[in-house]
Amino acid sequence: MIRKLFICFVLLFSSYISRAQENYSVSAIPKELMPYASAIVRKDETVVFIREKNNVIYRYKFAVTVLNKNGADEGELVLWHNKSRTIKNIKGMIYDEFGKPVSKISERDFRDDNYTPNSLFEDVKYKHFTPVSVSYPYTVEYEYELFSNQTFNLEHWYGVGSEATAVENSSFIVSCKPSLQLRYKEMNYKGTLITGKDDAGNDLYKWSISNFKAIRHEPYSPDKINYLPNVRLAVNNFTYEGVDGSYSNWNELGKWINDKLLTGRDELSAATVAKVKELTDGINDPKEKARKLYEYLQNKTRYISIQVGIGGYRPFKATEVDELSYGDCKGLVNYMHALLKAAGIQSWYCIVNGNTHKRPLQADFASPDQANHVILCLPFKSDTTWLECTSQHIPFGFLGDFTDDRTVLACTAEGGKLLKTPKYTADDNREIQKGEFTLAENGELTGTLETTFKGTQYENRDYLLLESYEDQQKYIRKAYPINNLEIAGLSLKATKEIKPSINETLQLKSYEYGTPENGRISFALNSVNRLSETPKEIRNRYTPIYINRGYTDEATISFTLPAGYHADSEPLNTTLTDNFGSYHADFSVVGNKLIYHRKLQLKDGSYSKEDYDKLVAFFEAVRNADYFDVVLAKNK
Amino acid sequence: MKRISYLTILFSLLLSATYASDFPFAAVANDALQQKKYLPDTGAHAVVLDEFGKTFISDDGNHMVMYYEYHVKIKLFDSQAFDAEGNIEIPLYKEDGERFETVRDIKAVTMFLDENGGLQTLELDPRKVFQTSVNKYHDVAKFAMPGLRKGCVIEYKYTVVSPFIFNFHDWIFQSDIPKVHSEYNARIPAIYNYNAILRGPLKLSTNKAELDRECLSVNGIKCDCSNMTYGIDNIPAFKREDYMTASKNFLSGIYFELSEYTNLSNGVRVKVTKDWQDIDRSLKGSEFFGSQIKRKELMRERIKDVIAGKTNNLDKAKAVYAFIQKNIKWNGFYSKYSEDGIKKALDTHSGLVGDINLALIAALKAADIPTDAVLLSTREHGLVNKLYPTESDFDYVIAKTTIDNKDYLLDATDPLLGFGMLPMRCINDQGRVISFEKPSYWMDIKSPQRRNKTTTLELSLMPNGKLKGTYTCYSLGYEGYEKRKEIKKFNTLDEYIENLDEKSTKIKILKSSVSNLDTLDAPLAEIYEIEIEPTRGTGMQRLSFSPFTFGQLTVNPFTLNERSYPVDMGMPADNKLVYTLTIPNDYVLETSPEPVAVALPLSCGRLVSAFTFDSGRCTYSQLYSFEKPVYSPEEYPYLKEFYNKLLQSEKAEIVIKKK
């Protein structure tokens, strides 16, 4: 990235000042943008005026050519708004393939709804427009302005928003009052940033990209923000819900959140404080006290999403959660924090990006919009314990795959601290199976399969713990690819520790598991854990390989063979080792028993895209070995 | 003597007062709070202890309005029930800014026993009820029950006020959780006459009707009401199964349809629906149904160029059908009426089902092709009743056109559907043909199309162990429709082929040709020249091949021990595979697949496979078919076993060995 000083602001702003008729004909799209594209962004201009702390105007002009039905979503416009974020001057036009205007779009054509299926309430509404066109391609162009009265959260720029969309031109121009002190974070931006000042002395910035080809979906690819160009903004001096503040780093931001959003919201009623004392009375170990209070929280509360106030940053008071027995993540974390405080245990409110795809907060760029969830950190002397407060059944101290292994911000009275949540490694995330099966001459299989799930694989079964026995059986019948599976017994036992595990014991029976034919019986060696799908090949891959989370699966299955039969198969002995993982499968015959052993390990991390062919070949070889059929022949 | 009669009157009054009354609010028995399980269904996460609904019509001074009161008391056994039962959504219908439903008098409490066994009651804060707009036609009022904990009992009630008195509130007894008792009270003024119908397998335990004298006063005129009460005790939970149609078809409930009302200004009784003649007449006269179908002049103009040069009716009809498919985009809403007229739909290129298919009917009529409208009920909307004429059982309209004595059912909402094909949602029992020329009548809504796939592989073993040859696949009927949909997910045919090639690492596509992609009536043909890497067998001494190169069935989709509801596959299906492998002279056949022949009872399906070997050519063929669209629960074990046999037959392998 080269930084250029560019003084002439007239030129800088020329792209949005010029109102020349655009050429939206499809034939004007550069040919090299067509492959894998279902839509082409013809023009995407965003101009941001950060005039005051409480006065930001975003001006958007956006045109996209939808090439076929798959790209139709790109032509839709959904804008959320509320009392501190208003949308004005929406207009637009639909053009045909030749760039001829077909119909006008005005604000009247937008629906304005506010139902969100997963929230009890959000104080936002959604303006929504879907262009109607019966033939492809067509182009839709929008213009609108967004007025915001806060600067805590600023809009980002995604030069390229989605897969299968090519971008002809996209630019992001920011003008900011110098006293507010704009900061920005560029990622994957290969162009030139132009900076300057306008006549009034405002700081000017311009990012732009052009002719960016469409990216198609690639298996095992990293998070989009890690390979598509994007820019994030923040100002040091901001206002939020009428409260001013300033921060230039995580420490100051954490301090502000603590002082302005959290302080005073952790008071509890005398009765609840007494309840806390009663619950923890006689327990000395603070961690055991915390465990007890966490159980209390889990039994008492449930998660309900309510988003009120800009972006919903302030938790409900602990007393309110106490009364209602429900809250969103902020409310529940703050409530747990209050319970712990009443027991004299320190805990920190931590903002985090919750997603199974890990997205850590950027250490070198502080901004609140990077987080979307809150968890609680208990900084005990010897070890740090983490609590997810929105689940009624997750074990104490276990985070699962939603917030593991990433940088979070603890908001404390001493300021914000960047901390890392625990990582569950490939060795931690285990599924260990042991089977004792007997195969009869008629092909019937009987036996017991014991499976232990650990680490994030704990979550493969935890949802079943609370289900009725009938429903558990229904799920299990689909979980194993064993035909005619009859369940003679099933039990699931959870050990709810910080490193939890679930033991599943399955007594099963399957008639015609093996196929007897002409004195031979063939049967599938592995029907307890087999890889059914392999990633497809990708020619000219764009992204590096990214394995988000590693795991280890191991199975040892013993088959007692029917009397008078011996194995008459080619041997199975597959061993694969690569930097991203390893696999081994074999079987051996000891007396009347055939012992099958399988181990697959996949290691998390980033690997070069050149290794992708190897990854596909690896999975392909695993699948082949997993589908191995053994043949038994009658002794002569 | 006098005294006694007085008492009797008092008694009977009391009786009718206690009759069908709501249960008291927030009165909960201690044993309900202590209850740990619901014995008839120990796996239930929650049980409805009592449920009461009441609908009545009243004059609010300006209009007649319908009041629907709902009241329920639910025991929650564990936290699994909290979100499902504790987050309440009340759907509200709206037409425009003037006519919409409102909810009022929401009251809700959570009751539980504290540690000392004392009853605690938490009330819902009315400020925590939120009303949201879902779309043009629907609002939702939401609230979350406060203070939920294991073992608590929740109770809430509310009233919905509706101007839509023609849509008398239906009552569905059965839900996802079991119910101890559910009761519905419908009070219908004599100026209205509704047909009521009970559906589903459960029997009513309460079914009473009586007359309320002078229950309603309209413009000073008093009228009586029918006061009807329906109740069921011990209702089991409804458990969903895979491959089933709308659960509504199996849920027990009471449904109402307005048949007659008295015009209050002149006292004349107006039949809304009495018999089919009335419905026919009202539809034909309707501005947004019959009048649209009659817009021949408009359509004649629009289709002039479309049918120009076409000489026979079939070609004309196909051209018109394609024209409507391409020119009005379906906005996703079902309807039997046009919304703002077909002209607007044609001009804006957008419309609901009624707009599109009434335009189609009008266009076909304009081309002088005899066409009628067919009203039907979609699969998710449930089955239509045949007991008495009703219009509200239908939620969809399609066209039926007759060409050379052959009937075609047409739905132009999906541009990938071939002429004469219906989307799955429409294939549901029977529809009512609304003809301008004769009285309406019932007809079966069946897809004339089957799901039909024929695959041939013609391969030769090369000296390097690779297989080379041709893969051909013809997809007809629904199979073709689905394949086209799959191909259209890609921007170009080349991208589809590339993806296919990338998906199967062992198979290389050397040359490809796909035909009839846009000729919807013809079979979609895919012909690929392919090369397959050697997969099984070590060395070249002994080689084995599976005829199921492009995937085989590995898991039986039917896993239940027993089934309560029919398995609905929508339509019959045929699948045929012919695999030919030519082997070099220096190889001999070692193992060949065993022939299989299995049939479902009463020829409702069959599976046949065969193998022949003749001068170096191995030919394996497999054919299976399902002859019925719907299989009954009694047939389930056979279906399950049929799949089991199918799976086993697909393990077939051809093993050859060097001489």
Image: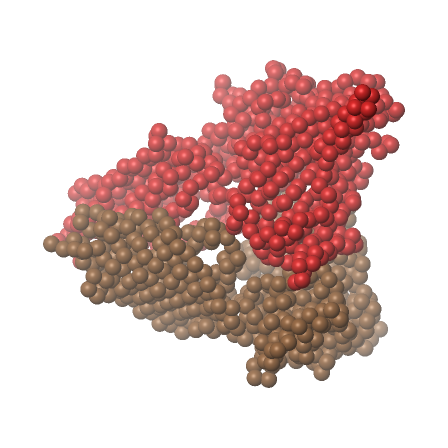
Foreground of the two, B196 or B349: B196
Residue drawn at x 75%, y 52% as measured from the top left: B129
Instruction: Single out the residue that lies furthest toward the bottom.
Output: A381
| Image quadrant containing the N terminus of chain A | bottom right
Depicted B376 relative to depicted A232: above or below: above
Foreground of the two, B403 or A23: B403
Q: Position of residue B264 (x, y in %)?
A: 82, 22
Depicted B220 relative to depicted A397: above or below: above
Chain A shade in the render:
brown
Q: Position of residue A540 (x, y in %)?
A: 46, 63
Dividing the picture into quadrants, the one containing residue A171 is: bottom right
Residue drawn at x 69%, y 58% as measured from the top left: B118
Q: Is residue A545 left or right of residue A432?
A: right
Dividing the picture into quadrants, the one containing residue B275 is: top right
**Colour red belongs to chain:** B
Instruction: Single out the residue that lies furthest toward the front.
Output: B1
Instruction: Single out the residue that lies furthest toward the top.
Output: B438
